[in-house]
Amino acid sequence: MIRSAVTVSLVPEVRGGPFVFWDDLPSAAAKAKAFGFDAIEVFPPSGDAVDPKLLRRILDDNGLSLAAVGTGAGWVKHRLHLCLPDAGLRAKARAFIKNIIEFAGPLGAPTIMGSMQGRYEGAIDASTARGYLLDALDDLGTHAAQYRVPLLYEPLNRYETNMATTLAAGVDLLKSLKGANVKLLADLFHMNIEETDSAAALRATAGFVGHIHFVDSNRRPAGLGHIDYVPIAAALSDIRYDGYLSAEAFPYPDPDAAAQQTIAMFRQFFC
Ligand code: LER
Ligand code: MN
């Protein structure tokens, strides 16, 4: 069964970015519950920023699950990523992600690695960066396995990374890993830019996709752009996708309306 989730950002530096709810975890959770979501996806400043016992209580009080936790604050706040030329900074990037795995894992949630994959440039060529990324994915996937949750690797559009920009390139990376605890995060916004046919791309990655960012072509909530969700829903049904559709979208026109729009589209097409 596909479940619904909605994002909550606790990172002031990404204000204006694609997150539905902002800053106030208890109020965001209460709204997620009221609108009928199954879960929230949290974007924290670090793995230490939120008391896990408090988050557990907030989730339980609202009958919600934690769908996933993002790590992009390591990039937006500290300019860290996994393909930097400096080995010490690469290690810091990995430690930042591990810290979030240690926060999210005991709460039953996978950790997302999107922006923290970085890019190759300057002294670092494509194959060196691929080696750094594969090594980190194996290490971080193994770290997540102790909590029986996967690591989620997210291909991004060409303006945000040059490592993997399509689901097929993501699968190629995953097939090169030693371990098997990394799943793909398919973000419909990035896919709308990079894929020839998003529904076909999803079909081709059956078994590899563990999480979906549910959003429209312009990064507004689903239904407010030009993505056709009929073939996407058919593809997800055919591959028996049973993870989350998580609203990582601009709070357009405002957070409550974005949440309402998302859950209406979720109910229309995906359940
Ligand atoms: C970034 O564009 C994105 O889609 C996030 O989910 C990455 O962490
Ligand atoms: Mn995303």
Image (spheres, rainbow, N blue to C red):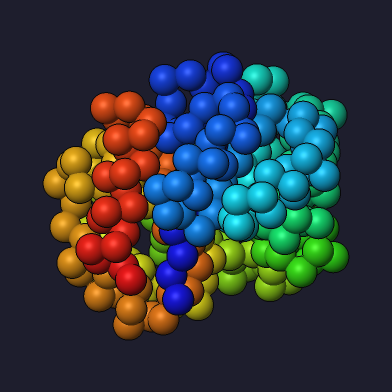
Quadrant of the image for the C terminus? Answer: bottom left
Res. 268 image quadrant: bottom left
Residue 27 to residue 130: above or below: above
- Relative image position of residue 101 (x, y in whole percent): 76, 49
Front in this rendered view, residue 216 or 137 = 216
User: Residue at 43% across / 42% down in the picture?
Assistant: 248
- Relative image position of residue 95 (x, y in whole percent): 82, 39
Front in this rendered view, residue 51 or 198 = 51
Front in this rendered view, residue 31 or 268 = 31
Decide if residue 244 is on the left or right side of residue 67. left
User: Residue at 31% across / 68% down in the picture?
Assistant: 270
Res. 84 image quadrant: top right
Residue 135 visible at all? no
- Relative image position of residue 42 (x, y in whole percent): 60, 41
Front in this rendered view, residue 238 or 49 = 49
Res. 221 image quadrant: top left
User: Residue at 81% across / 56% down in the picture?
Assistant: 106
Residue 192 to residue 238: above or below: above
User: Residue at 50% across / 67% down in the picture?
Assistant: 243
